[in-house]
Each structure stands twice: as structure tokens, then as C-alpha cells.
Amino acid sequence: MIILIAAAAENNALGKDNQLLWHLPEDFKRFKQITSGHYIIMGRKTFESFPKPLPNRTHVIITRQKNYLAEGCIIVHSLEEAIAISPKTEEVFIIGGAEIYNQSIDSADKIELTRVHTSLEADAYFPIIDLTQWKLTFEEHHHKDEKHDYDYTFETYLKI
């Protein structure tokens, strides 16, 4: 099963200058819980935005750079190649960036989205979720607090 996992504002903003636009500890906790033990597929710039590889996950990095190396990671040169080397009987997570989400949304089976209830300026956007192709099957609302600057909702969509 191919699953897109992301946090996006109401205007689908993901980030700017290769950085997230917010700090939501509960979203990070959910991301860790959901992706731990699985393959995570990402673009090179997304990988390079991490201080180090994420523990307990197999990193698959898509890059156009033929000689790119990242210790302990699998390097591929297309989304198709990334999916081909991932286990067919397990959940595989697409974790960004925007170009990879756009390339993969049509082949995904599920979307795990944290909808951040604000609209912000960005240079990277999540694709529009076409509700004729996706069904919202779960939502859990959270209010802003001392650790979270925005209201947010955990949403799960399944391909119809």
C-alpha cells in the first residue's frame, strides 16, 4: 500500500525554503508512530532538510544526481524505481516534497494528512485532493495550545 503522509495548510502550503511552516509536536509524534519500521520515500531536498536520517525507517531518496550518496539510504532516480524496490506486502510512505507528492498522488492508496487550519505563503504545495477520487474516512480535531500555534485536524483519505 502506498501512503502519502503530509501536513498542509488549508491553502495546501507545505513549506518554504525547504523548511516546514509550523512546529506541531503532536504531528511529529503521529508521523513517527505511523512511519516507524517502514520504507519512506522522499526527494533529495526533503532528505537534506533533516538533521540526520530518521531512526527505524528505510530511507529511499529520489534524486536526478547520478553520483548522489547518503550513508545508510537507498538512492534511486525516479518514483517508479523507488516504488519498485519497496516491499509490495507492506505500507510504504511518500513523505515529500511537493514534486514527489504530485508525481505519486494518482498511484497512492491512502493519504494521511494533518490539515493545519491556516493559510500561509509557501513555495511548496500539497496537491489538491479530488474528492471524486478520495473518501475522507477519519478526522480528529485538535485546538491550538501552548505547544501548537494553529488548530489542526488529522485526516485519513482512502482511494475510492
Image (spheres, rainbow, N blue to C red):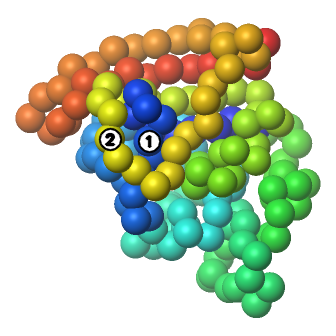
> Which picture quadrant has residue 28?
top left
Residue type, label 2: Leu
Rendered view: 51 above or below 121: below
Q: Are marks 1 and 2 in contact (CB under 8 Å)?
A: yes
Which disc, if any, is residue 66? none
> Which picture quadrant has residue 10?
top left
- What separation in Å lies between label 1 and label 2 (alpha carbons)? 6 Å
- Front in this rendered view, residue 123 or 23: 123
Which disc, if any, is residue 13? 1
> In the rendered view of the protein, which quadrant contains the N terminus?
top right
The residue shown at (27%, 47%) is 23
- 1 or 2: tag closer to the N-terminus: 1
The residue shown at (64%, 58%) is 42
The residue shown at (60%, 9%) is 137
Which disc, if any, is residue 120? 2
Rendered view: 17 above or below 25: below
> In the rendered view of the protein, which quadrant contains the C terminus?
top right
Q: Helix or strand or loop: what does disc 1 sit on?
A: strand
The residue shown at (69%, 44%) is 102
Q: Is residue 67 visible?
A: yes
